[in-house]
Structure formats: structure tokens, C-alpha cells
Image (tube, rainbow, N blue to C red):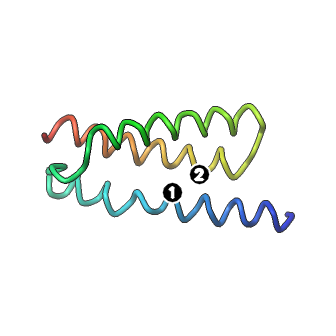
Amino acid sequence: MAYVELIGFAGAILTTVAFIPQAVKAWRSRSTRDVSLAMFLMIFVGIICWLTYGLLTEDAPLIAANTVSFVLASAILVAKLRYK
């Protein structure tokens, strides 16, 4: 694996793992009052765009990171809409 791909995976892991604390907090507390819906919708659409781009270019770090990010962001978005 080339060092450039390792850098991609490192960035992918860090930005993806960043969603975990918010997802856990939202589901445990049943509160998303402090999460901006507008900001989160923009992030969610951005994740979909990056995932699509990764699939089209067959870029493994983008596909891996954005697939996991999509799942975590979906959980937060569902919590945001459900637990207003």
C-alpha cells in the first residue's frame, strides 16, 4: 500500500470516528438540541457526494470512510428528526 493511500486512510479514519461520540450521545440522551439541523444536512449531503465520488473513482479510503460516516450520520440525523 502506497504512503499516499495510508495518509488517505488515516484521514478517513479520523474524520469518520469523529461522528461516534455525537451518535452515542444523541441516542443515549435522546436529545439533539445542540446539533444544528442545517449544518448536519449539509454534512450529510457532503458525505453522500464523497461516497459517490469514491465509488466512481474506485478510491478505497473514500469509500470506506464515507460508508461508515453515512451510517453514523444517518443515526444522528434520525435522532435529530425524532428527538427534537
Determine contact: label 1, label 2, CB under 8 Å: yes
Disc on the earlier residue, 1 or 2: 1
Residue 77 image position (x, y, % from top left): 31, 40
Q: Residue 1, located in which quarter of the rendered image? A: bottom right
**Left or right of residue 43, residue 30 in this image:** left
Q: Which residue is mark 1?
A: 16
What amino acid does circle 2 point to? Ala
Residue 38 image position (x, y, % from top left): 30, 37
Q: Which residue is mark 2?
A: 65
**Quarter of the C terminus within the rendering:** top left
Tell me the element at label 1.
helix
Q: Could you classify mark 1 by the number of other residues whose Cα lies within 10 Å: few (under 14), some (14-19), or many (20 or more)?
A: some
Is residue 52 depicted above or below 71 in this figure? above
Q: Residue at image x 27%, y 39%?
A: 37
Q: Residue at image x 47%, y 34%?
A: 45
Residue 19 image position (x, y, % from top left): 40, 57
Is residue 18 depicted above or below 26 in this figure? below
What amino acid does circle 1 point to? Thr
Q: Which mark is residue 61?
A: none
Q: Residue at image x 41%, y 37%?
A: 42
Is residue 39 depicted above or below 2 in this figure? above
